Image (cartoon, helix red, strand yellow):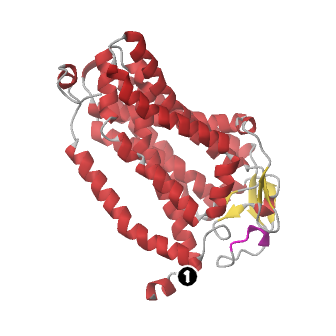
Amino acid sequence: MILHTLLDYEVLRFIWWILLGVLLVGFAVTDGFDLGTVIMLPFVGKTDLERRVVINSVGPVWEGNQVWLILGGGAIFAAWPQLYAVSFSGFYLAMAAILLALILRPVAFKYRSKRENVQWRAVWDWALFIGGFVPALVFGVAMGNVLQGVPFRLAPDMQIFYEGGFFGLLNPFALLTGLVSVAMLVMHGASWLALKTDGALASRSRLTGMVAAIVTIVLYALAGLLLWRFIDGYRITSTIVTDGPSNPLYKTVQAHAGGAWFANYAAHPWTLAAPLAGFAGALLAFLGLKRRWEGWTMIFSSLSIAGIVLSVGASMFPFILPSSIQPQASLTVWDASSSHLTLFIMLVCTCVFLPLILAYTSWVYNVLWGKVNPAEISDGKSHAY
């Protein structure tokens, strides 16, 4: 219990804010190339064999990559229960769309090659496209809405009331951030295919990835410009209590605070590393795809994704989920967490199991290292998709 005493409530809250970012980045990087790959499937695969090569490049690993999504959801549920309650209830239809798309993907993997009929396989190819495009778009749309504020309020007894609708989420800025998400994951998927395939398929993937990298840079810059000039942020106007009770209503918040989402960059210049990594990683991924730096390109595209995702958290800190209709109810790092003991127990479990997950994942990727061999897929004797 000595460690429990040393890690006070403020420190544990901050650690879990960092871990939430790590889990989101882990999901975006690992499952991101799965999503990007199947988005590209109907376009880069010109023959049935090429499309089977694309599918088999992610077939052995996509299920393991879903672990990061489960970890992220579990961490939000246990460490940030109010965030979980608001987001999973308010974004219910959006979450349902993501879930249906993610369910569609494994079904398509399993059934696509059960028949040799051309139309049958084409239908499942587009099903895989939907299974990749919808989650990529909706996750980005969600981030855009979080930056603008979500229409929820809290009663004095902490009961949550969400007063928005599904189509309200599809506003212009949120759709722009959704397109940023799609572009960066296509770039990541193209980097993966350039690493795992050869020949014409790899060439088309590199070209697609180069275009996606440029689109990522342009759209990310446009989203940043709009956020700076037209999207007002939030600012805490009362004394910030970092180790107080988890009750968001104990503070006061100024809404429509111009430039608030860029205040952290001015106060703590080191946080600029996140958006700079987003831009630099995409530019380096473009160069890597052009010059065929296969392994490095995956690292560069991963760096870009990490930078883009972390820039949202860096700009909003200490806010996690602002409220557009009751700013005082906005959830922050300091007033929306679980108890001190809960955060400590979760941290101990994370320190035990996260290294095991990383070690096992690294071992799996080492075993599966190398390019997909089209000959082994077409011989009809393998267990390929």
Point out residue 126 in the picture as x, y percentages from the top left corner: 47, 21
Relative to 67, residue 266 above or below: below
Tag 1: amino acid: Asp
In-image side of 248 versus 367 (left or right): right
In-image side of 188 versus 142 (left or right): left
Q: Which residue is mark 1?
A: 8
SS for dot 1? loop
Q: Residues within 10 Å of mark 1 (few under 14, many from 20)?
A: some
Of 197 and 211, nearer the camera is 197
Residue at x 41% of width, y 51% of height: 67
In-image side of 364 versus 279 (left or right): left
Confirm whether residue 319 shows in the render.
no
Q: Which image quadrant: the N terminus?
A: bottom left
Residue at x 45% of width, y 39% of height: 282
Relative to 174, residue 274 above or below: below
Q: Quadrant of residue 161?
A: bottom right
Q: Quick one: which residue is furthest to the top in this view?
A: 118
Relative to 6, residue 166 above or below: above
In magenta stretch: residue 337: no
Point out residue 60 in the picture as x, y percentages from the top left corner: 30, 38
Tell me the chief SS of the magenta region.
helix
Q: Which residues are magenta?
A: 246-250
Of 159 and 194, nearer the camera is 159
Q: Which image quadrant: the C terminus?
A: top left
